[in-house]
Image (spheres, helix red, strand yellow):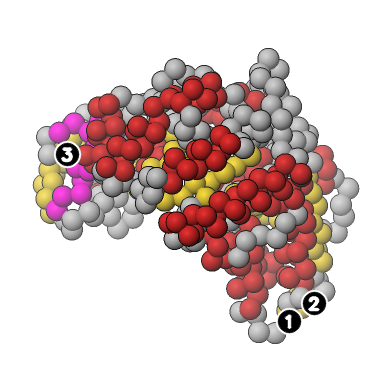
């Protein structure tokens, strides 16, 4: 996720929620939060902690410099309704690692500045689900997480072998991750872990060791996601890495399946889950819905395809009679999801008479053809590969291709610019079955 205003360390209010306590008190965008209960608010964690009481005293600096003080009685844990220009209310901590697989190091030049910022901030893990390495934290900060009981926390582990982790992250402080995780277990926090798997580096016996070590910290560590390394064409002067092949991905899935059986018997949970990329690249059938155990790492690409497919089927079942439609749509996707989206297309067409859907796989020329996921498709690749299509009512793209809070692609083209270049409306759809079916129906 891109951060905005990550160098801003003032508590500037960007937005006031409608119907909120803050709106009632006439707090406005541009005002500055100074303190709560006479305690300066250092960051969003302080804010969340201090604002939770049922009686608080809030000091606000208005845009004209006047200081307003409010005594507020409210429900316990009720928020004031404030959104800050910097979501952290503090400077974001940048990553000190030089990971051998870092995706940001593989970005092309001249992209927008925010894409090059490497965050490694525990507050973002708590607030927005970002994964952190725990190499950027003092003992005081770890104590603060424990005392504030900040969880769930998402941790990029990669390996529990201290020497190997130091090499993979190129950070001499990277080897103590397991000791920190044990402190989280003693405090009974909730943790989700991920392993970026690099063939020949942290797979095989090293992966076996890592999963065994992490399983000893269950249930504090609730789940582990295994995702493949992403390799772009921009790896000049970086360590040579091998991508996963169909055969090696298949071997990995067999390994994960065996481990799931073992953990089911020992822990009553599958514990470790492979990302969708492994299944799509091998064309293996996705696990059943229940086998994802509530989808604890959906935003990490674990079970996203299955969840989406189930949602589409659910929405289609609500359509009691066939819908007549003369519309013609393109479903643009990454090459990895091409077969999957064709299956989705076939399910949709069973409920629509006259509808035409074309699934078009977009080859990633921008980052390189080894990048196959839909979320990294750029506007210019859409334009280059979809030109020439006539009599199309719309091009439907997944919302994951764009910034979280703005319809702009990774190459800074807006959805309006892509639509104009193609002379076809481009429509973004959330990766939710209901949203896609609603677009097609309406």
Q: Which mark is residue 353?
A: 2
Whether residues under marks 3 and 2 lie with C-beta atoms below 8 angstroms apart, the answer is no
Q: Nearer the viewer, residue 223 or 72?
A: 223
Tell me if 88 is positioned left or right of 48 in this view: right
Tell me if 276 is positioned left or right of 345 in this view: left
User: For mark 1, what is the residue?
Assistant: 322
Structural distance between the alpha carbons of marks 1 and 3: 58 Å
Q: Residue at x 11, y 50 (%)?
A: 55
**Sooner in the amino-acid sequence: mark 2 or mark 1:** 1
Q: Which mark is residue 36?
A: 3
On the question of residue 226 being in view, the answer is yes
What's drawn in magenta, residue-wise? 39-54
Q: How many marks?
A: 3
**Sooner in the amino-acid sequence: mark 1 or mark 3:** 3
Q: Which mark is residue 383?
A: none
Q: Nearer the viewer, residue 184 or 82?
A: 184
């Amino acid at each position: 996720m891109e951060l905005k205003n990550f160098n801003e360390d003032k508590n500037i209010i960007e937005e006031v929620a409608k119907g909120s306590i803050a709106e009632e008190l006439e707090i406005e965008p541009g005002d500055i939060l100074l303190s709560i209960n006479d305690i300066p608010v250092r960051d969003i964690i302080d804010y969340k902690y201090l604002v939770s009481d049922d009686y608080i005293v809030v000091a606000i600096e208005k845009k004209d410099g006047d200081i307003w003080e409010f005594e507020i009685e409210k429900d316990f844990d009720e928020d004031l309704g404030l959104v800050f220009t910097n979501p952290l209310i503090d400077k974001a901590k940048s990553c000190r690692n030089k990971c051998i697989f870092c995706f940001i190091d593989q970005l092309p030049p001249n992209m927008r500045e925010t894409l090059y910022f490497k965050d490694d901030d525990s507050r973002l893990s708590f607030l927005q689900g970002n994964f952190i390495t725990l190499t950027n934290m003092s003992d005081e900060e770890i104590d603060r997480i424990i005392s504030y009981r900040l969880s769930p926390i998402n941790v990029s582990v990669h390996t529990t072998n201290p020497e190997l982790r130091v090499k993979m992250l190129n950070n001499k402080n990277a080897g103590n991750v397991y000791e920190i995780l044990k402190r989280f277990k003693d405090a009974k926090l909730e943790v989700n872990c991920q392993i970026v798997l690099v063939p020949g580096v942290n797979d095989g016996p090293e992966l076996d060791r890592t999963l065994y070590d992490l399983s000893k910290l269950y249930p504090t560590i609730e789940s582990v996601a295994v995702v493949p390394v992403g390799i772009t064409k921009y790896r000049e002067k970086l360590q040579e890495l091998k991508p996963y092949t169909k055969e090696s991905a298949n071997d990995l899935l067999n390994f994960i399946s065996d481990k799931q059986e073992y953990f089911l018997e020992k822990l009553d949970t599958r514990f470790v889950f492979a990302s969708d990329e492994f299944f799509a690249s091998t064309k293996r059938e996705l696990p059943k819905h229940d086998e994802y155990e509530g989808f604890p790492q959906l935003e990490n690409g674990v079970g996203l395809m299955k969840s989406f497919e189930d949602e589409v089927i659910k929405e289609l079942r609500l359509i009691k009679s066939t819908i007549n439609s003369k519309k013609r749509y393109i479903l643009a996707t990454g090459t990895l999801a091409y077969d999957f989206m064709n299956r989705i297309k076939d399910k949709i067409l069973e409920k629509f008479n006259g509808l035409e859907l074309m699934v078009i796989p977009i080859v990633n020329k921008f980052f390189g053809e080894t990048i196959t996921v839909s979320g990294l498709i750029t506007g210019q690749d859409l334009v280059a590969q979809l030109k020439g299509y006539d009599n199309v009512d719309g091009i439907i793209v997944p919302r994951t291709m764009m910034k979280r809070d703005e319809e702009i692609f990774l190459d800074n083209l807006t959805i309006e610019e892509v639509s104009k270049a193609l002379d076809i409306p481009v429509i973004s759809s959330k990766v939710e079955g209901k949203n896609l079916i609603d677009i097609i129906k309406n």
